[in-house]
Image (cartoon, grey):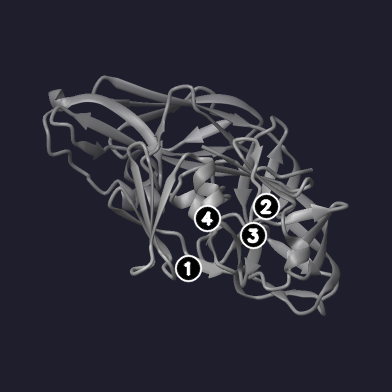
C-alpha cells in the first residue's frame, strides 16, 4: 500500500501525565472570571486549534494530550487544562483525566466513539475521539537532520534506497476507520546485514548495494516485512516532478547530493510565478511574487522570506551552472504541500 504524507499525530502508548503537569503549571489563575471570553483546545506542542468537529483517531491503549486555553479580554491566553472539568461521553471507550496531573489527557480503552468535553468558567470546548483497531502499517523514512519525510520510491513493490542516504525508518499505522497514526516501530530487523544494519535510533547503516528484507514490528499489534534494495543515487531518483499537476521540464535533473534530494531552483520558482534576480557580486538570488520576497545565498542553508530567516537544513548548491536546492527548501520556505507517489516515482508539489 502506498503511503501518502499526512498531517498525523504522534502516538503515546503510555498514559504520560507529566507533560500536562509541566505544560499547565499555572495552578492559580491571575485574572477575574469575567475576563474570560472563550476557551479553545489546541495540540500539546503547537498552536494548532482543534475545532469542535475535530476527530482524533486512536487505538487501545494509546493516549493523547490536548491543551485547554482561556482567551482573555485583553487578547492574551492562559493555559487552564488543570483547572477545567473534563468529561467523556463514553467512558468505556475513552477515559479522561482531571486536575493538575491529568487534565487534558485521555486514553483509549475500547473500540467505538466518544466526545471529550472541557468545561471552564461557563464555557465549553469539545472534540471527538474514534477508537479503531490497527489493520495495516506503511513504512516511511525521514532524514536525520530536518526530520522531514525522505523521498524514497519503489520499483516492483521494493523500496529503492540511495547508497548515500542517512535516514531513519518510521511507520504509519493504518486503522480500520482509514486514519493513519505516525510512530516508530518497536523492532526493525534486516535479514541481510551485509547490505543494511541499524544504528542508534534505528538509523539505517547502508553497507553495500543489494537486497534485504526489513521486518518491522509494532508491539504485539502488527508485524510486516518490507523489501529493500540499496542502489546507486541515480537509480533511486524520481521519474517526474509536478507543480500543481504540471510536469516540470528541468534543464538539469534532480540529484541525490550526499544525504538529500536536490532539485533545480529556477524551474520550481518560475512554476509558482516568481520572478528571479541574480546578483553575481554577492551570489544572492532574489525571487519575488506578488507580496512575497525570498532571498537565497549560494552555499547557505537558510533563506529570508519577507525578512524572516528560515532554515531548511542543507546548503544551496550550484551544479553545471544551475542552482539546486534541497527538497526541504520547497517545504519550509515556499510552504507548499509535497506528496510523494512512491509507486509512480513522482513528486507532486502544490501551492
- Look at the numbered discs 2 and 3 and tell me whether their residues touch, using CB distance below 8 Å: no
- The reply to whether residue 49 is in sight is yes
For marks 1 and 4, give the CA distance: 12 Å
Q: Are marks 1 and 4 in contact (CB under 8 Å)?
A: no
Q: Which mark is residue 6?
A: none
Describe the element under mark 2 as helix, strand or loop.
Answer: strand
Q: Residue 275 lies in what quarter of the image?
A: top left
Query: Does 36 appear above or below 109?
Result: above
Q: Nearer the viewer, mark 1 or mark 4?
A: 4
Camera sees residue 60 = no
Residue 92 lies, with reference to residue 328, above or below; the image says above
Q: Residue at x 65, y 66 (%)?
A: 256
Residue beneath disc 3:
252
Is 85 displayed left or right of 333 in the figure?
left
Rounded to the nearest whole Å, what is the CA distance between mark 1 and mark 2?
A: 28 Å
For discs 2 and 4, the disc positioned in front in the rendered view: 4
Q: Measure the C-alpha gap from mark 4 to mark 3.
A: 10 Å
Say whether residue 238 is left or right of residue 14. right
Residue position marked by numbered label 4 in the rendering = 265
Between 36 and 268, the one nearer to me in the picture: 268
Q: Could you say which disc has been placed on residue 315 in the image?
A: 1
* Mark 1 or mark 2: whose residue is earlier in sequence: 2
Image position, residue 79 (x, y; %): 27, 40
- Tag 2 residue: 171
- Determine which quarter of the picture holds residue 92: top right
Query: Relative to residue 50, is residue 101 depicted above or below?
Result: below
Amino acid at each position: 500500500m502506498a503511503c501518502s504524507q499526512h498531517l498525523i499525530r504522534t502516538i503515546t502508548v503510555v498514559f504520560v501525565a507529566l507533560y500536562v503537569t509541566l505544560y499547565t503549571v499555572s495552578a492559580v489563575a491571575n485574572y477575574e472570571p469575567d475576563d474570560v471570553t472563550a476557551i479553545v483546545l489546541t495540540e500539546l506542542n503547537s498552536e494548532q486549534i482543534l475545532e469542535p468537529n475535530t476527530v482524533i483517531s486512536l487505538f487501545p491503549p494509546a493516549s493523547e494530550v490536548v491543551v485547554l486555553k482561556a482567551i482573555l479580554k485583553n487578547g492574551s491566553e492562559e493555559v487552564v487544562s488543570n483547572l477545567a472539568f473534563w468529561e467523556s461521553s463514553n467512558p468505556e471507550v475513552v477515559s479522561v483525566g482531571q486536575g493538575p496531573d491529568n487534565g487534558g489527557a485521555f486514553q483509549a480503552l475500547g473500540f467505538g466513539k466518544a466526545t471529550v468535553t472541557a468545561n471552564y468558567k461557563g464555557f465549553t470546548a469539545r472534540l471527538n475521539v474514534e477508537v479503531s483497531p490497527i489493520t495495516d502499517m506503511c513504512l516511511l523514512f525521514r532524514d536525520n537532520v530536518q526530520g522531514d519525510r525522505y523521498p524514497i520510491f519503489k520499483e516492483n513493490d521494493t523500496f529503492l534506497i540511495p547508497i548515500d542516504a542517512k535516514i531513519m525508518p518510521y511507520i504509519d499505522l493504518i486503522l480500520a476507520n482509514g486514519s493513519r497514526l505516525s510512530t516508530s516501530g518497536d523492532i526493525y530487523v534486516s535479514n541481510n546485514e551485509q547490505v543494511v544494519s541499524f544504528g542508534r535510533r534505528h538509523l539505517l547503516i547502508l553497507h553495500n548495494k543489494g537486497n534485504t528484507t526489513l521486518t518491522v514490528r509494532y508491539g504485539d499489534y502488527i508485524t510486516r516485512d518490507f523489501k529493500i534494495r540499496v542502489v546507486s543515487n541515480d537509480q533511486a531518483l524520481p521519474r517526474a516532478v509536478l507543480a500543481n499537476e504540471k510536469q516540470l521540464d528541468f534543464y538539469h535533473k534532480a540529484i541525490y547530493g550526499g544525504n538529500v534530494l536536490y532539485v533545480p531552483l529556477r524551474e520550481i520558482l518560475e512554476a509558482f510565478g516568481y520572478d528571479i534576480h541574480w546578483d553575481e557580486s554577492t551570489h544572492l538570488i532574489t525571487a519575488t511574487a506578488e507580496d512575497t520576497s525570498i532571498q537565497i545565498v549560494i552555499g547557505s542553508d537558510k533563506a529570508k522570506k519577507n525578512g524572516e530567516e528560515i532554515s531548511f537544513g542543507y546548503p544551496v548548491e550550484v551544479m553545471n551552472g544551475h542552482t539546486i536546492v534541497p527538497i526541504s527548501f520547497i517545504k519550509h520556505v515556499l510552504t507548499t504541500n509535497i506528496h510523494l507517489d512512491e509507486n509512480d516515482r513522482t513528486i507532486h508539489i502544490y501551492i
